[in-house]
Each structure stands twice: as C-alpha cells, then as structure tokens.
Amino acid sequence: MSQYIRWFKDITIEDVPLVGGKNASLGEMYRYLVPKGINIPNGFAITAKAYFDFLKKVKIQKEIEQILSQSNLQNIKSLQAAGKKIRTLILKTSLFQDLEKEIIKNYRKLSKLFKEENVTVAVRSSATAEDLPSASFAGQHETYLNISGEEELLKAVKNCFSSLFLDRAISYREEKGFEHMKVGLSVGIQKMVRSDISSAGIMFTLDTETGFPNIIVINGIFGLGEMIVKGKITPDEFLVFKPTLRQAQGKLYKPIIRKDLGRKTKKYIYSKNGGVKEAPVSLKEQIRFCLNDKDILTLAKWGLIIEDHYSKKNKKWTPQDIEWAKDGKTGELFIVQSRPETVHSLDTSKFYQEYEIQTKKKPILTGIAIGNKIGLGKVHLIENVNKLSELKKGEVLVTRMTDPDWTSAMPLASAIITNEGGKTCHAAIISRELGIPCIVGTGKATKVLKNNQEITVDCTSGAEGKIFLGKISFKKKTYELKKIPHLKTKISVNIGAPEIAFQTALIPNDGVGLAREEFIIAEKVRIHPLALYHYKRFKSQKSKFKITIQKSKLNNILKEIDQMTVEHKDKKEYFIKELAEGIAQIAAAFYPKEVIVRFSDFKTNEYRQLIGGELFESLEENPMLGWRGASRYYDPRYQPAFEMECQAMKMVIEKFGLKNISVMVPFCRTPEEGKKVVKIIKKYLKETKIYVMAEIPSNVLLINEFLDIFDGMSIGSNDLTQLVMGIDRDNATIAHIANENNEAVKKMIADIIRICRKRNKYVGICGQAPSDYSEFAEFLVKEGITAISLNPDTVIKTILHLAKIKQ
C-alpha cells in the first residue's frame, strides 16, 4: 500500500492522523455505510505524510518555521503578513516527483472507474487536527470544485497545502492551542456530484440553535453547496421528526414537520475553464423547494444511520454535521462529508439559563436569531475583509456577510449582524461555536445601522432576532436543573410561538397545557381561513358573499394571497399545511408528553386583522362576548374553516405521527354546542382526547352535562373571572375590584376540580392566574388539581415555591 495514497475503501475513522478528520470520516462511511444504502462518491486521499515529506524534500520547512517564530500571531496585521509569505512560498515550489507520479497514477485509475478520460473531481483539504470533538475547523481550509485534468489537479493539491496557512487557519490554531508545524494536511480527491444542475446543502442531526436532539434540520439550495456557507442566500429549510421517522423505517409516517422556502436568488455552477462561477436562479426555481418530500425523507434516514453509526462507535450520542448533494444527471442523492457537531454535543451543562429583555420598545431591525443570548455594544460597519483589523473588542460587527476569512476577528465581537445568510451560513456556524449572539439575514443592516451607534442585539425571542437602539437592560437567571424538584401536581407550559418550542422544552415540565393556534395563524398563516377557502369564487368574481369593499381593494387582497401562497394551487392546502407545521413543531418539542392544542379563539375584531378578514367579519360592539369559540365552529358561515383546522390536526397526528396531541374547545356556552362541535371533530379525529375550556359560569353550573360530552376540562381563569365578577379584564379603571383570588371565582374553580376528580376526568388550568399569583397556585394544589399550565418564564419559580410550601 502506498505511503502517500489511500483509497476511501482502505480508510477508517481511526486514520485521522494519516488522512485528517474529513477524509477519515469519508473512508469510514464509504467502508461501512455504503453497504447500508448510503451513496458516497468514490475517491482517494493524499496522506498527511505526503504533506510533511513535501515540506522536507523541497526544503521549505525551516523557512516556514522561521517566518512563524519571527511573527506576532496575536496581531492581525503581523499574522496576515506571515500567512501571505508562507502561502507564496508553497505555491511557487513544485511537488516532489514521487508524489506527482502517485497522484497522477491514482487519478487515472479513478477516471477509468467512471469511464471518463479526465474525471471531474472535488479536491478537499482535510487537516489532522480537524473534526476533533474539541474543534471543528469548519471552513478553515480550502476546497476546489470542478477540477479536471492532471495539471489542474496538481495545482489544486498545492493550493490545498497552502490553505493550511490561510490567515483564518493560523488564527484558529492559535486560539485552540495547536502547534502549527505539527498539524498535517491530507487532500481528498472525490468524484464530483453534478449538483451544479440540481441542488446541495447541509444537514444537522439536531436543532442547531438549542441542541434539541429529536429533529433533523436540512438546509438546501440550487447549485453547488458552497453558496450556503458563503452566506450569500437564505436556503430552504426542512425539519424532520426523528422518533416517528424511526418507526417502521419511516414508512408509516412522513414526518416533515416544517418546510420553509428560502431566498434562493443565486447559485454556483461549473465554469467552462474549471472551477465555479456565480449564476442567477430563475424566478420559477426561486418559488419552488430544492428537494421533494421523498428526497427529504431519504436524506433524513441517512442522517439517522450516520448518527447511529458514530454514536455506537463512540459509545455516546454523536450528532452530525453532514454535507449532501443531488446529481442533476442521475437524480441520485449523495453524502459528500460528515463531521461531529461541536457546539451542543459538547455541552454537558446541567444548568438552564433564562434571559429576559426589559423593554417595550420596537426593534429597529429584525432577522434570523442565532443562539439565545443578548449582546450590547457599539456598531462597527466593516465592508470587506481588508478592514477587519479595525474591529475592537466588544464592538458589534455589522457586515453584508462573512466567510471563513473573517473567523480570526470574530471572537472580538460582542455580537454579529449580517444582511445575508441563513441558519447554516458561516456567520451562524462560527457564532454558535463562540457563544456570541448573532442575527443573520436582516436584509439591510448595513444601511440601517450607523458606526458608533450603541445597540442591543436580542436573540432570546425564538426564531426572530431583534436589534434595539440604545443599551437595553436585561435579566439573566441561572438554574441548576438537578436541584429542581418534581411535584405530584403536573406542571405544564402555555405556548403559542412554535419557534420557542425546542428551547422551552428544556425547562422541567410535564407537557403543554395550552398550545394556542392564534399565534400560528396570525404570524405564520396571516390570511383569514375563509379568504383561502373561497379564493376561487372571489377570483372568478362569482362569490355568493355580498362584497362591501371596493373591487380594487378585493384585487389587492387576492394579489397578496397569490404572493404568499405561490407554492399552492389549492389555497386551502396552504392554511392546513402552515397550521399543521406550527402545531407539529410544538408537539415534537414535548413528545411524548401530552400537548393540549386549543382550536382558534380569535374574536371578530382579531379575525378582521387577518388578510381578507373584513370580507367575513362584522363589527361587534363587544367581541369578547360575541361570535367566538364553539359558536363559530358549527355555524355554516365558519364551519368550512373549522374543518380546515381539524384537517391540520389530522395531518399532525396521522401523517407526522405525533399522537401526543389532545384538542380543546374554547368558549362553549351550552352542552348542545358541545355536541355539535364534537361531532365535527370526530369526523377527522377518531381517537384523540377532546377537552373543553371551563371559562363561562354555565360550564360550572352544568358541569356534569359538559363532562358527559368531553374528556375533561381546562380552566380558563381569565375569562371565568371576567364573567363571574362582571369585570372587563381590559379595563384598568376597575381592575382593582377583583382578580382570580376572589372567593366567588375560587369557589367556582374548587367545584370544577372536585367534580372532575370525582368523575375521573382530566382537570387542569391554563389561565394566567397561577403564573401571576403564587398564592393562587398554592390554592390549586391544595384543591387537588391534576395539572397547572404556566407561562414558560414562571415555571421554575413556581415549582420551587410550591415545593417549599409542601415541605
């Protein structure tokens, strides 16, 4: 066997000292996972010994050592000068003859295997200190794509050798404490996948923001995958739920619980003279996903196999950061790289941190939040990498986008903001690793923000990152999780935003007592369900509804619907899919614990705020006591929309396999209403538990009649207090008269708990009171309530209080 060349079939993960992390992983997968059905392009590695022998035989090793020893590598300018000298030295020096012969001989063999004269290859750097558990080295060294012909291959190999001394690579080794001359570089020569005429991307076998282990995140774009890391565009994103994917090898369910269309305006394609070039993406392609559902599920299954393989090998959970590509000629999918994820997999912390920003100000800018911290500092706009040395410690780095050349300066920043990029762009990957708050994809940060402005960067509100002008104060609490006691009374959470579900699930909890549809409809769907249901009639001007708005306004509504639902011919599908995805993200986060989802409880004035809402909603004097909850669901005017809600729920349970869902009916005034609504629900959901909100005095006075229809009750203490005491809960003038602690309200609640328990039915509370008043939470526990559902920020505080009282 050659000392300078190893084919993938002859490499395992134990060969990191010989071929580096990247190539060792490729060999491991080629040897063990190709037989399990995973496609990996064939190839070979030039060993690190070849690199070390090159330095010695062409007599440049001592010169490199001298340059490094005479440079101050803590100083950016000195580091840049040293790096340039070393790279120039390597590039102007020829490879020694024996190595050249070996490379050419094996390249010819690879070409013969694929029946091509000069097979097109990817030439990838793989350092011996790369992809270790303590360091990722992601993007530190170069990859050269679309390389064809012997001369071009030899040139690319030398370029890879020189990339070991790129500024960012020197800086990273300095930071991690690696000795520069002891880190070797192997080069992988791998058959190119023709993703330039198809798609490519990245896959993580955990949630990249929270470390939540039960999902696979796939990001994809058209063209070669390098465009994602460059951060030039926002990729498509797909979330796949692992537990139901595993069941019956995923044949039973299709658990793609979320699909988000990116902003794919550019792509990398082959350049005629070798290498790659940037090209525009057609409008037709921009509005479609880069992968179909079958491909998404295939990649996710492969992700599971790869993660399971490395976890078994390492005898501990080893989540993976994987690169994939789809061949446009054959339609086949390939895995081209896999490395261990190095942020959350290393986090053995037993602490939970809560951040709470203290402002009611509106942010001046928003984008995609990376991490869950808050950063403060003065803005420093940096146009390009040449100005990077100007960045001072504690400043907020603001730029169009970053690439691996920016890495050396990023640890100085208190926060990072970019115009472009998605969750897997370079700025996002490095910020996560450094623990720096980062907001990407703002679209216009470099135009809105000015040098020396004091700003606050908030990544604590879920997927949306917020940038505030000025120094905003915030609270930070740290809890030691093992010291949080477990109570006999179930403590669950109230949640509305799917984006915070994975983070919220890290809090000690017994599931979700109230998942609200309203937030999903208002933020994700944004269109009135009936406007989608009757879209075709309005479009053809044949609507049976009496139109009271101008034709031009109706046309504007239809135009807005067209823009937002471009991927759906049947607009009803848009509502069902978006609502199902929002619910699924919450249910997946807490699986297999029970998640109680309340059907929509908008009032007419809130429905009017949705696009097209004024076509269907009248103006009511008192919407709080008007057409809401159960009374809408069986009304012929709204029933089609309610059935769409039921179809969304059916999709989550039957297609995604999230059987931990129960449903809840709000504001049900009479048992007769309850029967009508349950009949509609059971058309779609045969075995799902159906609860009713106990929030109207009639629910308490006729409790046995309601419990004959429903599986239990969840107390809505906000509305119950309002209706028992005759108090408008939104009127601050009379708020002092009474709250949930009033004896009349407590008597009603005590009756609900007693009778539900007597009849062995579920009884919980999802109203605001136990989150606001600790003494009210005590009262509920003493009365024997089954479950208390709290706002996430009060869960730990309430558990600790109730545990003390019990003692």
Image: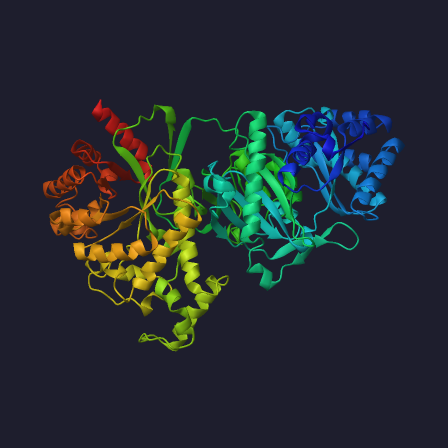
Residue at the limit of the structure toward the right, as seen here: 97
The spot of residue 130 in percent (x, y) is 66, 31
Quadrant, the C terminus: top left
The spot of residue 417 in percent (x, y) is 53, 45
- The residue located at (63%, 56%) in the rendering is 266
Report the side of 571 relative to 192 (left or right). left
- The residue located at (52%, 51%) in the rendering is 445
Where on the picture, by quarter, is residue 44?
A: top right
Report the side of 562 relative to 46 (left or right). left
- The residue located at (57%, 39%) in the rendering is 303
Q: Is residue 668 visible?
A: yes
Residue in the foreground of this view, choosing between 39 and 275:
39
- Please say if 70 is above or below 609: above
For the image shown, how many numbered marks are present on the structure? 0
- Please say if 608 is above or below 93: below
- Please say if 330 is above or below 604: above
Report the side of 734 relative to 128 (left or right). left
The spot of residue 423 in percent (x, y) is 53, 45
Task: Report the coloring of the rendering.
Answer: rainbow
Report the side of 339 relative to 738 (left or right). right
